[in-house]
Image (spheres, rainbow, N blue to C red):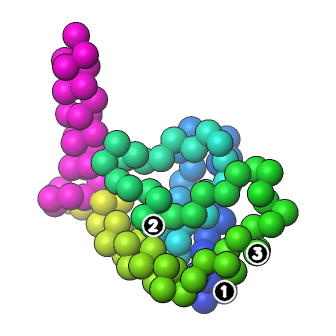
Amino acid sequence: MINKSKYWICPSGYEVASPRIVEAIYAECVPVLISLDHVLLFGDVLDWDAFSVQVSMSEIPNMKIILMDIPEDEYLRMHERVMQMQRHFVVNDPSRRFDVFHMILHSIWLKMLNVQISR
């Protein structure tokens, strides 16, 4: 069933960042983010609007319509971007350029840079 899915529903759950999002990316599905409080992994670096759909809690009853109204060419662009984003969520040993380890270091570096600039 998962292999035939185009979209993967990702409610926020109990954690700050839901593992469902990474599971969706691994499964090559476009994540559908349901929450106002999602902390998007690498949100300071990645353009989540380019490869995910965000649905508010109040829009849940209309989610099927929202997803069916996404034109096929737009879905294909999002799906292609999901495929491109996979490497950023992979753990390699040893670490490789742009894998999750490098993304974490890059996010920390950006945060430190922003703190220094704002002082």
Asked whether residue 112 is drawn in magenta, I would say yes
Label 2, residues with CA under 10 Å away: few <14, some 14-19, many ≥20: many
Mark 2–mark 1 CB contact (< 8 Å): no
Q: Name the residue that disc number 3 marks.
A: 65
Amino acid type at circle 3 is Ile
Asked if one can make out residue 27 in the rendered structure from this viewpoint, the answer is no
Foreground: 13 or 67?
A: 67
Amino acid type at circle 2 is Phe
Q: Name the residue that disc number 2 marks.
A: 51
Spot occupied by residue 56 in the image (x, y as percentages of width and height): 70, 51
Instruction: Give the distance between the C-alpha atoms of the residues marked 1 and 3, in whole angstroms.
Output: 20 Å
Spot occupied by residue 85 in the image (x, y as percentages of width and height): 34, 66
Spot occupied by residue 28 in the image (x, y as percentages of width and height): 47, 77
Q: Name the residue that disc number 1 marks.
A: 1
Asked whether residue 52 is drawn in magenta, I would say no
The residue positioned 20% from the left and 33% from the top of the image is: 109
Relative to residue 54, is residue 50 drawn left or right? Answer: left
Tag 2's secondary structure?
A: loop
Q: Which numbered disc, 2 or 3, marks the residue that appears first in the sequence?
A: 2
Q: Which numbered disc, 1 or 3, marks the residue that appears first in the sequence?
A: 1
Q: Is residue 35 above or below residue 28?
A: above
Quarter of the image holding residue 37? top right
Spot occupied by residue 65 in the image (x, y as percentages of width and height): 76, 75
Amino acid type at circle 1 is Met
Q: Which numbered disc, 2 or 1, marks the residue that appears first in the sequence?
A: 1
Tag 1's secondary structure?
A: loop
- The main secondary structure of the magenta stretch is helix
Q: Is residue 64 above or below residue 9?
A: below
The residue positioned 57% from the left and 83% from the top of the image is: 71
Relative to residue 96, is residue 50 drawn left or right? Answer: right
- Magenta-tinted stretch: 94-119
Quarter of the image holding residue 8? bottom right
